[in-house]
Amino acid sequence: MRLTPHPLIYDWNHDAAARQPGRDRAMLNDETLRDGLQSPSVRAPTIEQRIAILHHMDALGIDTADVGLPGAGPRVAKDVELLVRAIVEARLTIRPNCAARTLIADLRPIAEISQRTGVAIECGAFIGSSSIRQYAEGWTLDYLQKCTEDALTFAVKEGLPVMYVTEDTTRATPETLRLLFSTAIRAGASRLCIADTVGHATPNGARALVTYVKALLHERGADHVGIDWHGHRDRGFGVASSLAALEAGATRLHGAALGIGERCGNTPIDLLLVNLVLMGYIDRDLTALPAYCQAVARACDVPIATNYPVVGADAFRTATGVHAAAVMKAYRMGDRALMDAVYSAVPASLVGREQQIEVGPLSGRSNVTFWLESRGLPVTDEVVDRIFAAAKASRRTLTLDQIQKLAGDPHDAVIKSR
């Protein structure tokens, strides 16, 4: 069910999530621990940190997670097995998958880990599909088809669920996709993944491509085969194109925490979660979302921009007089929903946060009064005037310490910021 906006808001979005009570319409595949780590700027998390991140994913109801590419070597294979065992031992509901080139040599380590752990690990077998990639690599279409048939036949025989991933799908010809996808269907793939590898697709392009693949599946009598969308944000369309793909018939969307990944990164799975809940595609408790993003930020040494949507420090924070005044009026009316909606598109309470009023050069006196009242500090004209004057003379929002000193509070050491 779609999260109903505040009754005083007229919603032009008219988001059209199908009404299926008690059933999610969208699955999510988290690429943070594999594709996300391909960013040249991140620090690789320790195995302990990766396991902790898996627990965060599970708490958010994320369906599947890419835990690595075992074909890259013994060290990666060892880590993948540890992660799979951690999922089993903690009885997490999230299911593991592994990336692999569409080669038997890459699929064999996944099969071996699957046999040792007793887990049917989904393999994401990827292969380039666009003409530009074929030209650069010196590949022929016959070669791609043979790799697909041989590798997927092996994986299915080994009992592995197969997600067939055509790299750079969004720049491949319809004829190439028809041949490769048809081959994958015959070989037993259970899912086809449309990969917007370089973030080329617009929402219209995503919609058109998913519609084409869905029609192909129907034509082949393979409506049971699921469609994945793997997006990147090189043009800033990551979330928008993912939602367009979903509306067109994709049933699982990929992303990474904070949008980490190659170049400009993957679609941010945190923002996908928020939008899918707001639009009614899924029903989740997202109060643990900030903790998940912070855990990834710490483990990967990726600072969260202050203006990052939903989990950034400034997402629900204002020092501007007009904005703050409206939020404060809602607060004094005792209306949390109004406080969350009057100057926010996303309710802070949805992700376990609160609206914050700060004091800065664009603030009014009411900001100062509210700041003091909300922290149980005495409000006098003298104190308000002193803080207000300092704010107007400042070039930045005043810090907690600065306001406490100006307020002259003897217990400032124990006062905590909201």
Image: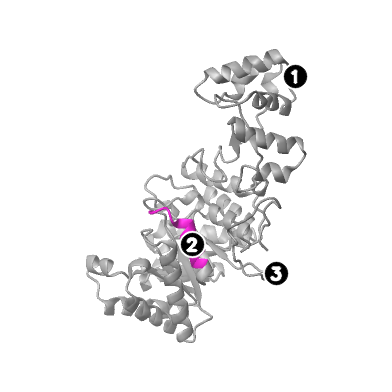
Q: Residue furthest right?
A: 334
- Amino acid found under the numbered disc labelled 2: Ser
Q: Quadrant of residue 389?
A: top right
Q: Badge 1 is on which residue?
A: 378
**Could you say whether the residue bearing mark 1 is in a helix, strand or loop?**
loop
Most common secondary structure along the magenta stretch: helix
Residue 300 position in % (x across, y down): 47, 45
Closer to the camera, 232 or 347? 347
Q: Badge 3 is on which residue?
A: 21
Q: Tell me which numbered mark, 3 or 2, is placed earlier along the sequence.
A: 3
Q: CA distance from mark 3 to mark 2?
A: 23 Å
Span highlighted in magenta in the image: 234-246
**Could you say whether the residue bearing mark 2 is in a helix, strand or loop?**
helix
Point out the image quarter for the N terminus: bottom right
Left or right of 8, for residue 179:
left
Q: Is residue 276 above or below residue 346?
A: below
- Amino acid found under the numbered disc labelled 3: Pro
Q: Residue at x 61, y 64 (%)?
A: 281
Left or right of 331, for residue 404:
left
- Amino acid found under the numbered disc labelled 1: Pro
Q: CA distance from mark 1 to mark 3?
A: 50 Å
